Image: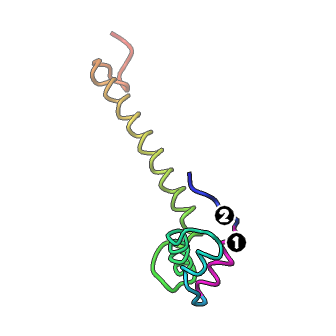
């Protein structure tokens, strides 16, 4: 399970990395893995507009949209299945109930 760090700590470290401090020095100072700090730096560069990518504040809405699409696709599959059940049984859902 990944370790979660306080937002203030992450913000402070990211500011220092963007100012040019070495990642390895900060990793030793804060006892945080250098891989973690490199990921933080990459995202901080994107958020600052210095690199291309999805900003952290945009990823939430993007995730919400993806979940919504997944839900709608599941709903569509259920509707298609129900439609197939009607056509297999020879029942026309718009047809008359008279014999």
* Relative height, residue 25 to residue 34 (above, below): below
Residue 29, which numbered label? none
Q: Is residue 17 magenta?
A: yes
x and y percent of residue 71 in the render? 48, 44
- How many C-alpha atoms fall within 10 Å of the one at disc 1: few (<14), some, or many (≥20)? few
Give percent across and percent down for residue 9.
Answer: 70, 72
Disc 2 residue crowd, few under 14, some 14–19, many 20+, Cα 10 Å = few
Residue at x 55% of width, y 68% of height: 33
In the rendered image of this protein, does residue 42 appear above or below residue 2? below
Q: Secondary structure at mark 1?
A: helix
- Alpha-carbon distance for marks 1 and 2? 7 Å
First to last magenta residue range: 7-18
The colour scheme of the drawn protein is rainbow
Give the secondary structure at mark 2.
loop
16 with respect to 52 (left or right): right
The quadrant the C terminus occupies is top left
Q: Main secondary structure of the magenta part?
A: helix
* Residue matched to label 2: 5
Residue lying at the far front in this picture: please name it: 28
96 and 40: which one is in front?
40
- In terms of depth relative to the viewer, which is nearer, 20 or 66? 20
- Check disc 1 and report the residue beneath it: 9
Residue contact between numbered discs 1 and 2, judged by CB atoms under 8 Å: yes
Residue 23 higher or lower than 54, as above or below: below
Task: Tell me which residue sits at (52%, 72%) in the image.
Answer: 34
């Amino acid at each position: 399970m990944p370790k979660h760090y306080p937002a203030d700590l992450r913000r402070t470290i990211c500011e220092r990395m963007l100012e040019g401090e070495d990642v390895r020095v900060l990793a030793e100072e804060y006892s945080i893995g250098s891989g973690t700090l490199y990921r933080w730096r990459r995202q901080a560069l994107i958020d600052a507009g210095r690199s291309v990518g999805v900003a952290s504040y945009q990823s939430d809405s993007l995730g919400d949209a993806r979940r919504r699409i997944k839900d709608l696709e599941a709903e569509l599959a259920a509707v298609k299945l129900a439609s197939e059940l009607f056509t297999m049984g020879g029942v026309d859902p718009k047809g008359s109930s008279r014999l």
